[in-house]
Image (cartoon, grey):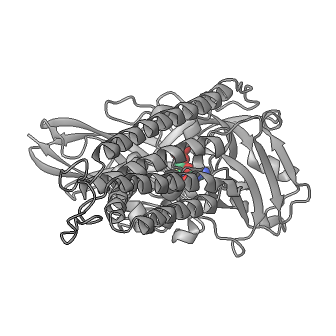
Amino acid sequence: MAAAALSGLAAGYAALAVAELAAVAVRPEASPVTAVGGAAIDRTPSAVKDWAIRNFGTNDKLMLQLGILTVLAVLAATLGAAALRFRGAASAGVLLFGVVGALAATGRPDSTSPLDAVPSVAGALVAAVVLFALVGRLTGPDAAPPAPSAPSAPPAPRSTVSGWGLDRRGFVVGVAGMAAVSTGAGFLGRRLNAAGAQNAAASRATVELPPPASAAPALPRGVDLRLPGLSPFTTPTADFYRVDTALTVPRVDIGSWKLRIHGQGVSRPLTLGFPELLRRPLVERDITLTCVSNEVGGSYVGTARWLGVRLADLLEEAGVRPPSKGGPADQLVARSVDGMTLGTPVETVMDGRDALLAVGMNGEPLPFAHGFPVRMLVPGLFGYVSACKWIRDIELTTFDAYDPYWVRRDWAAEAPVKTESRIDTPKPFANVRAGTVVVAGVAWAQHKGIDRVEVRVDGGAWRRAELAAEGPVDTWRQWSWEWPATPGTRTLEVRATDRTGYTQTDKRARPVPDGASGWHSVVVTVA
Ligand SMILES: Nc1nc2c(c(=O)[nH]1)N[C@H]1C(S)=C(S)[C@@H](COP(=O)(O)O)O[C@H]1N2
Ligand SMILES: [Mo]
């Protein structure tokens, strides 16, 4: 029984190794683990996804892959054990896995070829053969009961260890051989994949971004208070949050990258390559990006210096008019190379704000994880309705006619950023000394600006915090407050008022469907 389960594991291992190797040849994203994982992500209810993002953060994808591998291992061992009695049926069961993987791979939104089924099918075929062969070596007591009524039975088995069947040596050699060959194949696959990634990295390294025609306005002195524990005004790229559904980060080849702009009211459809995009005037802007999944006090917000082409200029070049000027399309649907779809109001993109097709982030070409070679950004809108990474297509349509990815999953079709504020220091449950304690954080209301930040202790009177110098209207604003802290367990709360006069509501809302609301609070112990 244990040996049969081991056969199942060996077969599963061989299947994965072969599938990974085949995926290198076909398309890395066609690997069954990636494809099934992607399909699982797309079918995960928002609440569960929310929970996973909250609990595993950026490790959510690693956890998913580990989960898939664990489930596969258990199923493989079970099928192996079943194969002891039903060798043919179990091998057929293995093939069924291949079908599931193949359907997942070809059903992915970024799949363009039925060849994506090859890794799963190849893996399953290999696993079925391996299982059939290995279990064949195990003629256990169940499979070949010694017939007591037949004294002239065939000669005794070579091995008599109970449960290890007749051909123990053959079995052990078979499992060891399979494991060795699979490990070799796995390593080769890894190597080839790494080589592919290196090529992509080399192609990114050759990108030279032209200087901006319109540089970022100089930041006033004092936008960054540089206090210990306070988020810096410009988020270092390495610390910038990442949220997307991509199990493997797309590594787009700029040589073949194209962006198409088409759809309703597009009188001059455009198709641009990367060099053509760079020939247009580039603008450089500081913009704060926020994720709708950000909880009150959460870390899915960051500010970077982006370089890009103004999207409104390209749309005008394509003949697009916003609805207020009689254009027929009110929704711009952006599509990425990994099949994501995001919908943005055309009116917002063309209302004069710096909606960008960004190519640079903090002085460098976009990192792969942040959308290389080109991504969208619309200041004032949550990322999921505006910030398409790895963009390849822009279609002008209507909100009535098309629901993009997240809208099909219960999120709002239109989602302007909510005015929010966060306490960065002191940290929750910190121990501080009585006396003057510096409380500091950030507040954001992109494209409106922050007018006022207030802090209160233990539900007392609101006190005005000191605001850092005001940066561009699309960026967050730092604040600080000198707190005369007295001993005890204290609750600090913060709220911001934006330049429209709106003060953050204390009404707590979860991120679904259009962003969290409520005051951030931090409990600290003063001694
Ligand atoms: N292709 C693609 N683009 C995407 C997403 C995605 O899942 N796939 N997620 C969006 C969301 S929800 C956010 S908040 C931003 C995050 O951008 P960042 O990872 O660069 O911070 O990207 C947006 N663009
Ligand atoms: Mo997001």
Quadrant where the image shows the N terminus: bottom left
Q: Is residue 129 above or below residue 252?
A: below
Q: Nearer the viewer, residue 68 or 415?
A: 68
Residue 493 in sight: no
Q: Position of residue 352 (x, y in %)?
A: 73, 51
Residue 296 image position (x, y, % from top left): 37, 56
Question: Residue 365: which quarter of the image?
Answer: top right
Residue 40 lies left or right of residue 427; in this view the side is: right
> Quick one: which residue is furthest to the front in this view?
152
> Whole-percent x and y of residue 317?
87, 49
Q: Nearer the viewer, residue 366 or 307?
A: 366
For the point 34% across and 54% down, the residue is 70
Picture residue at 64% right of the left edge, 38% below the top: 372
- Picture coordinates of residue 81 (x, y %)? 31, 61
From the viewer's perspective, is 200 left or right of 17?
right
Residue 208 sits above or below residue 507 on the image: above
Above or below — where is 280 with respect to 508?
Answer: above
**In terms of image quadrants, where is residue 107?**
bottom right
Q: Which of 366/484 is in front?
A: 366
Total marks in image: 0
